[in-house]
Amino acid sequence: MPQTARFPGPDALLSRAPIGWAGRVGVKRTSWLALAALVGLGAFVVYTSLQAGGVRCEVCIEFGGGRACRAVDGATEREALMAAQTNACALLASGVTNTMACERTDPTSTACRAR
């Protein structure tokens, strides 16, 4: 008759645990601290990404036979205009040289408003 393998039960495993661990199945304090730090960092990232900018600008650019309009929120008008132009050029240009040329092109229209 073939022998079947016997697996030790939970009591046998705990009896082999290091001193001070028997009967104590839980999470270490450092694990809780690490978890709290990660949750705090995640909350900070979500809060800062959802925070609305002070200005919203829309920029339209014609470059290389195409036209693209993009709207961006920013803390300042200048920041929002630059980001919107960069975003629009990302759709119109490919490669470093074309992207730089597009970003130096004057926009065909811009519109900014406070948020």
Image (cartoon, rainbow, N blue to C red):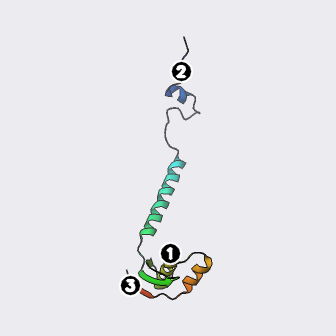
Tell me if mark 2 has few (under 14), some (14-19) or many (20+) residues whose alpha carbon lies within 10 angstroms of its own: few
- In the image, is 47 to the left or to the right of 7? left
Residue at 46%, 88% in the rendered image: 108
Q: Position of residue 77 (x, y in %)?
A: 46, 84
Q: Position of residue 39 (x, y in %)?
A: 47, 57
- Residue labelled with disc 2: 6
- Residue labelled with disc 1: 91
Q: Looking at the picture, does residue 66 appear above or below residue 8? A: below
**Which of marks 2 and 3 precedes in the sequence?**
2
Q: Position of residue 7 (x, y in %)?
A: 53, 24
Instruction: Please identify the quarter of the rendering in which residue 109 is found.
Output: bottom left
What amino acid does circle 2 point to? Answer: Arg
Which is in the foreground here, disc 3 or disc 2?
3
What amino acid does circle 1 point to? Answer: Leu
- In the image, is 57 to the left or to the right of 102? left
SS at mark 2 in the image: loop
Q: For this rendering, which residue is in front, 100 or 27?
A: 100
| Marks 3/2: CA–CA distance | 73 Å
- Residue labelled with disc 3: 113
Instruction: Please identify the quarter of the rendering in which residue 5 is found.
Output: top right
